[in-house]
Amino acid sequence: MDTSMKTKFSRQREAIRKQLSGRHDHPTAETLYEELKEEFPRLSVATVYRNLNQLVESGEIAKINLNGPARFDYNPEPHSHFVCKGCGCVVDMSDNNDEALIAARKNFDGDIESCSSQFYGMCSQCIKETAQ
């Protein structure tokens, strides 16, 4: 986390951070807005985006850009994700990409710092639904 970037305390930003913490479903800004608008009736989607972008810039959270709207991850460390082609859910994978990183570094004339990857397929819920 970049501690040199000072931002003024914001109840809304803290609520967004809290809403993201402990989650592994990587919600969109719109999802977070829908979840928080009852607690913060004057909250706007633009405010949610602005606060999420500040959290990304400070290194507190990660932004995942896939096909469709950006998703946000409470874990900013490089790691892999599974993306369901059925329902579109995005979930963390337990691997840490060490083997891929080692192999890439052997074959690259430069400095690779980290890597992350996406796996695509069908989640167990979608498989169950298509089997019925």
Image (cartoon, helix red, strand yellow):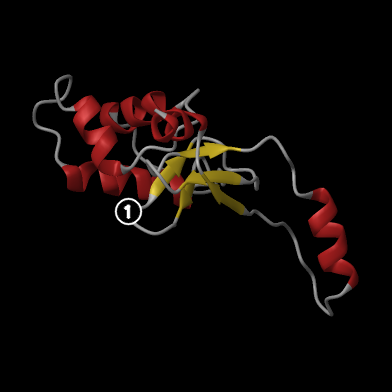
Q: Nearer the viewer, residue 95 or 127?
A: 127
Q: Seen from this angle, which residue lies furthest bottom?
A: 109
Asked if residue 70 lies left or right of residue 35, the reply is: right
Residue 107 position by quadrant: bottom right
Question: Residue at 18% across / 19% down in the picture?
Answer: 39
Quarter location, residue 34: top left
Dividing the picture into quadrants, the one containing residue 20 is top left
Q: Residue 18, relative to residue 104: is it above or below?
A: above
- For label 1, the SS is loop
**117 relative to 109 in the view: left or right:** left
Q: How many marks overall?
A: 1
Q: In the orientation shown, which residue stands out farthest toward the front?
A: 132
Q: Which residue corresponds to the image point at 51% horizontal and 30% vertical from the top-left?
A: 124
Left or right for 49, reference 67: left
Instruction: Say which quadrant the C terminus sits in.
Output: top left
Q: In x, y percent, where is residue 94?
A: 69, 35
The residue at the far top in this view is 39
Give the class, few, some or many, for how many residues have Cα within 10 Å of label 1's Cα (few <14, many ≥20).
few
Indicate whether 37 appears above or below 48: above
Q: Where is residue 2 in the image (x, y as percent from the top left)?
A: 56, 47
Give the image location of residue 41, x and y in percent.
9, 26
What's under tag 1, amino acid-wise? Pro
Q: Nearer the viewer, residue 127 or 33?
A: 127
Where is residue 68? Give x, y as percent. Answer: 33, 56
User: Which residue occupies the extreme right position in the image?
Assistant: 106
Residue drawn at 47 percent across, 26 percent down = 23
- In the rendered image, the quadrant that contains the N terminus is top right
Q: Is residue 61 above or below residue 131?
A: below
For disc 1, the marked residue is 69
Q: Which residue is drawn at 41% across and 35% down?
A: 130
